[in-house]
Image (cartoon, helix red, strand yellow):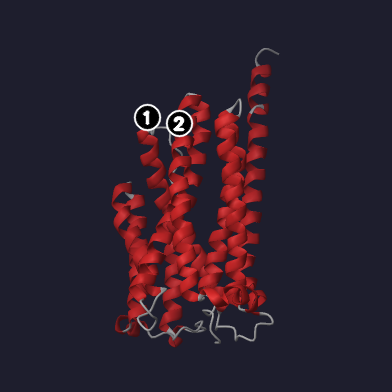
Amino acid sequence: MTLTRPTAEVADGPEPARRHATGRAVAVLALVAVAALIPLLGPRAALDGTGEAAPPGAGGIALLRAVLFAALCVPVGELFAARLARRVGAPLGDAPRSWAPFAAAAGFVAALGLASVVATGNLLPHHLSDMDVGGLYQTREGKLALLEVNAFGVVGLCAFYRRPALQVWPLAAVAVAEALRAHPPTEDSPLVGSGLTLVHLICASLWVGGLLYVLRMLRELRKSGPTETGVALLGLYARVAAVLFAALTATGTWSALRRMPPGTVLDQLTTTAYGRTLLAKLLLVVAVAVLALWARLRLRRATDPLSACSPARAEVLALGVVVVVSGVLTALPVPIRW
């Protein structure tokens, strides 16, 4: 009896944890599947009744763009959160496993898919013969697409060889390429638009990816580190996130007014696909702001400051939806008749 009883206790011990981990993995997969439906079905729903023609392959392009944005957020957020952790003296030896290699792989595949679209004249390729790979080097859009593919490849190599600091440069290249791609030279003041998009994209990546990794670090700190360290880390992130939110609001508003003149905004928010998607994104950002405020209030006033993690987790999920909707926004025609 004395020999078998400890064995039974050991066998029974990890079982609930294993079931919990399995349930969490299933929930994450379900959320990812639901999130994938938004870019696939979103463009059609947004265009319904507007009189605008659907761009070729809008659903697939929106999905690839959303994956690319998410892949950019993860490694940027990890670098940002690690810097914050060092400032509060959090032990980085027990930091959670980096997701940067997986993000880089996803970003590489998404960028490659988007490059193949460019190689077929902004149409979804059905056969390899449809793509003019050599033509990518002859156009501005093609060169930017290739830059993103190569940049994510370098990010993956840096992550694989555990050189996180070197990831900054290829990640910056992806952000710059996206900003330039979103504002072709044919539009008015393209450099102003690219600058606004670049700041908006960087701030969004820091906010989304930073919060995700901070919450992952807090889980580890609760196991091994003092509570004060976790509270200090979350508090520092909250202060920086307030600045990021202000920058996102300013650049997002300015960019929207450049696309839609002030006198037409209210009308285009309901009568164009771009405006409808922008309105949905705005409502989601308002929900995110409410969750962020709730988390900050808990952090300051609750008996257990780390109870702020609950609304912060909801904030991460809402931010994930914002990223997906942003992918839809890039696949829709700007507020002029297609």
Picture coordinates of residue 265 (x, y %)? Answer: 57, 73
**Which quarter of the rendering shows the C terminus?**
bottom right
Q: Is residue 103 visible?
A: no
Position of residue 30 relative to residue 146, above or below, is: above
Residue that carries the numbered disc 2 in the rendered image = 232
Residue that carries the numbered disc 1 in the rendered image = 89
**Which quarter of the rendering shows the N terminus?**
top right
Badge 2 marks a residue whose secondary structure is helix
Side of 7 where 64 appears, left or right: left
Task: Identify residue type, mark 1.
Answer: Gly
- Label 2 neighbour load within 10 Å: few <14, some 14-19, many 20+: some
Position of residue 1 relative to residue 47, above or below, is: above
Of residues 306 and 199, which is closer to you in this image?
199
Task: Identify residue type, mark 2.
Answer: Ala
The CA span between labels 1 and 2 is 9 Å
- Label 1 neighbour load within 10 Å: few <14, some 14-19, many 20+: few
Q: Residue at x 32, y 76 (%)?
A: 143
Q: Which residue in the rendered view is the most extreme toward the top?
A: 2
Q: How many marks?
A: 2
Position of residue 185 relative to residue 78, above or below, is: below
Depth check, mark 1 against mark 2: the one in front is 2
Picture coordinates of residue 205 (x, y %)? Answer: 44, 55
Numbered tag placed on residue 231 in the rendering: none
Picture coordinates of residue 16 (x, y %)? Answer: 68, 33
Side of 225 where 184 appears, left or right: left
Does the CB distance between marks 1 and 2 fall below 8 Å? yes
Of residues 255 and 310, which is closer to you in this image?
255
